Amino acid sequence: MTPRPSALQRKIVEHLWESSRTLRELANEATAIEKAARAIVASLRRGGKLLAFGNGGSAADAQHLTAELSGRFEKDRRGLPAVALTTNASAVTAIANDYSYDQIFSRQLQGLARRGDVVVAISTSGDSRNVLEGVKEAQKAGAVVIAWTGKGGGKLKRTADICVDVPAQRTSHIQEGHLALLHTLCAIVEDELFPATPKARGRR
């Protein structure tokens, strides 16, 4: 007789099934993901750069995205110009102290964003004030803004040029969707920019 799953096992299964459902439903955002991929590829082909930012787990996603592009994802190819605005602790804390936390991204974008660049703004709620302020500054500079959101997209969905809204309410599942989105975009960027370069072997 097969033993009945414990309450904890049922909770584990429920969480994983909900996560997998979010990823399957994220496929419905294929049109927006394609637009995002094309915008990133076009910018990098023209000599533009990618700037990414967010808070907390979204900051980690920004760093993960730019690491895969400036380093490598699956192919040994030249590094791409990609910068996360969350990694310079001195800049972030100085701006927060001298101005306000709401400006930690917008102040950096004043100096870094240029027409033709792509900015990836990440917020699971779509309503993070400092992310929205960063978007305003990026658009003033003429950069294309790609938003990664969830929970319907919030204010960010209404202001970004392109928005991928993960169809989930739980922050953890939205972040899991963002990770899948990140890897999908990196794969497309490498295939489009370096079609003849073979996949790298191991080492990670």
Image: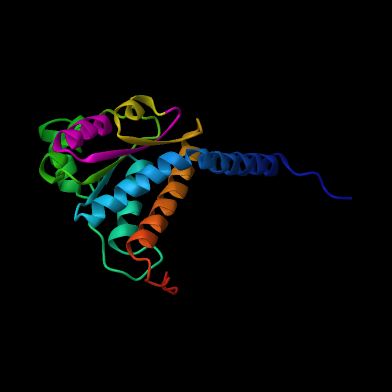
Foreground: 94 or 177? 177
Q: Residue at x 41, y 39 (%)?
A: 32
Q: Position of residue 45 (x, y in %)?
A: 24, 56
Q: How many marks?
A: 0
Let me know if residue 151 is in the magenta part: yes
Q: Give percent across and percent down for residue 200.
A: 41, 72
Does the magenta segment cover residue 80?
A: no
Q: Is residue 64 above or below residue 196?
A: above
Query: Can residue 184 be seen in the rendering of this structure?
Result: yes
* Apparent side of residue 16 relative to residue 152 in the rendered image (left or right): right
Visible residue check, residue 60 = no
Q: Nearer the viewer, residue 16 or 71?
A: 71
Residue 30 point in image, percent of width and height: 47, 42
Q: Residue 113 lies in what quarter of the image? A: top left
* Colour mapping used in the image: rainbow
Q: Nearer the viewer, residue 161 or 91?
A: 161
Q: Is residue 79 above or below residue 174?
A: below
Q: Residue at x 27, y 68 (%)?
A: 78
Q: Quadrant of the C terminus?
A: bottom left
Question: Magenta segment, which residues?
Answer: 130-152
Q: Residue furthest right?
A: 1
102 relative position to 57: left or right: left
Residue 172 x %, y %: 48, 39
> At 59% from the left edge and 44% from the top edge, which residue is drawn?
20
